[in-house]
Image (cartoon, rainbow, N blue to C red):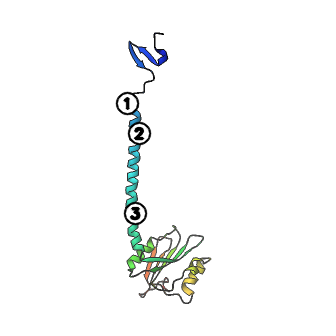
Amino acid sequence: MGNDEGCGKVKKNNIMTDSKKKKGFSSQLPGIVLFVIIFGGWYLIASYDDNDTAKRSVANARTEARSNNFREVGYFKAANKDRIISVEMIGSVTAAEAKAYAKRKMNTPGRMTAVYFYAPGSVIPADGLTLANNLYAANTVLYDMPGLSKWRYAYMNYGNGSEEFVDCRKPNNSGLCR
């Protein structure tokens, strides 16, 4: 046997080549380029997402720091998504801070959201408000239950696009104050 075919060698143009020889780097280049493109794209997307997440984390930390001045005590949500929230103010809170906090509370478009702010140490409706069966019962707890403290600020998003914020320590004609 003079031609080494059984050994995996093939003679081409008088040059012996190994048919089992692995492909060279140049034949692997398209795969490497594809890997770099995919990995690079993934890295850029992940970096963007991490940067965006970091920005959101900073914004959330600022919001949380402002929100630390407030403690939600009672939360009523009707079947139609009208909401009433009772909030205790922790420490010294300005009217502007209370209004900004109220505006950040969940509101379903076309539905009413009311937020009532109480001074620290007040007797604030909690379970009576949260467990109310309907909006009428929730308002009865707020306005008619004996022994509850009066709220300092009231905010109402009426659901038609109009809003009202009232400092109940000052004389006003609003029905939002007790």
Q: Name the residue under label 1.
A: 25
In the drawing, does residue 149 fall left or right of residue 57?
A: right
Residue 57: mark: 3
Q: As shown in the figure, which amino acid type bears the numbered disc 3?
A: Ser
Marks 1 and 3, how far apart at CA: 45 Å
Q: Are marks 2 and 3 in contact (CB under 8 Å)?
A: no
Q: Distance between the residues labelled 1 and 2?
A: 14 Å
Q: Which of marks 1 and 2 is in front?
A: 1
Disc 2, SS: helix
Which tag, 1 or 2, sits closer to the chain's start? 1
Where residue 101 appears, x then y in whole percent?
43, 74
| Residues packed near mark 1 inside 10 Å, few (<14), some (14 to 19) or many (20 plus) | few
Q: Residue at x 41, y 27 (%)?
A: 23
At 46% from the left edge and 11% from the top edge, which residue is drawn? Answer: 3
Give neighbour class at mark 2: few <14, some 14-19, many 20+ (Cα, 10 Å).
few
The x and y percentages for residue 13 are: 39, 12
Of 55 and 76, nearer the camera is 55
Front: mark 2 or 3: 2
Per the image, label 3 sits on a secondary structure element best described as: helix
- Mark 2 and mark 3 lie on one chain; the one further toward the N terminus is 2
Mark 2 lies on residue: 35
